[in-house]
Image: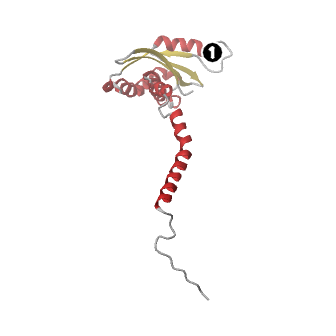
Amino acid sequence: MVRVTRRAPGADRPPAGERAQLVLAAAALVAVALAPVVVAYLQLGYHADVTASAEYDSPGRNAERLLGRAVHDATRDVPADFAWGERTAAVAAVRADLRPRLDALRSSRVESGTVYQVSYNRSAAEAWRDSSCPGGPNRQFGPCEARRGVVVQNRAGRTHVLAVAFDVRVVSEESEMALTLVVEGVE
């Protein structure tokens, strides 16, 4: 035999007062569960790494990165293209390849009030040559020469660019900075 029980609509729901208490209890449980997340967020906070951003965005660091890439690109094919006897032409070719990159650096941040002045530093190139190119009878490669801010070396009768020296002056509304950068080329 099947027994059928009839209930009035809404009879299986708790009364309205009990339902409101259940909703409040669930909300309190969610709030307690989220509290550690909120506390951690407030303690740690979210902001850019000021030190890293300042270093990454510093005009001197920007100049160093741009010049590093430019020298690498300009010197990559020099040994294949220039014999040691053509080292003067090699230096002229490197400087010609660097000219558009130097012009781009000079005009890169003018609209934001930062001006770069870039020139070759002959004395820094000579100092780099004196300290970094070995001399004497036991050296592995030929002599090094510093020409117009570019250090070249004779390696198996080919011209290799070892370094390029620059003076960089950065002027902005807040500061002025002068750097001497010696960027090593592709050896």
**Looking at the image, which residue is at 52% across and 31% down?**
80
Location of residue 138 with respect to 187 vertically, above or below = above
Question: Looking at the picture, which amino acid does disc 1 mark?
Answer: Pro
For the rendered model, the colour scheme is: secondary structure
**Looking at the image, which residue is at 53% across and 53% down?**
26
Where does the C terminus fall, quadrant-wise? top right
Quarter of the image holding residue 174?
top left
Between 139 and 51, the residue placed more toward the observer is: 51
Between 52 and 34, the residue placed more toward the observer is: 34
**Looking at the image, which residue is at 59% across and 24% down?**
155
- SS for dot 1: loop
Q: Find residue 180 and report its horizontal and vertical position in percent.
A: 47, 15
Location of residue 43 with respect to 129 vertically, above or below = below
Q: Find residue 147 and report its horizontal and vertical position in percent.
A: 47, 16
Location of residue 180 with respect to 104 vertically, above or below = above
**Looking at the image, which residue is at 47% across and 24% down?**
61
> What number of labels is visible?
1
Where does the N terminus fall, quadrant-wise? bottom right
Location of residue 78 with respect to 14 vertically, above or below = above
Q: Find residue 53 and report its horizontal and vertical position in percent.
A: 47, 28
For residue 146, side relative to residue 156 (left or right)? left
Q: Find residue 163 and report its horizontal and vertical position in percent.
A: 52, 21
- Extreme residue toward the left, this view: 111
- Extreme residue toward the right, this view: 138
Between 26 and 170, the residue placed more toward the observer is: 26
Between 102 and 122, the residue placed more toward the observer is: 102
Say which residue label 1 marks.
Answer: 134
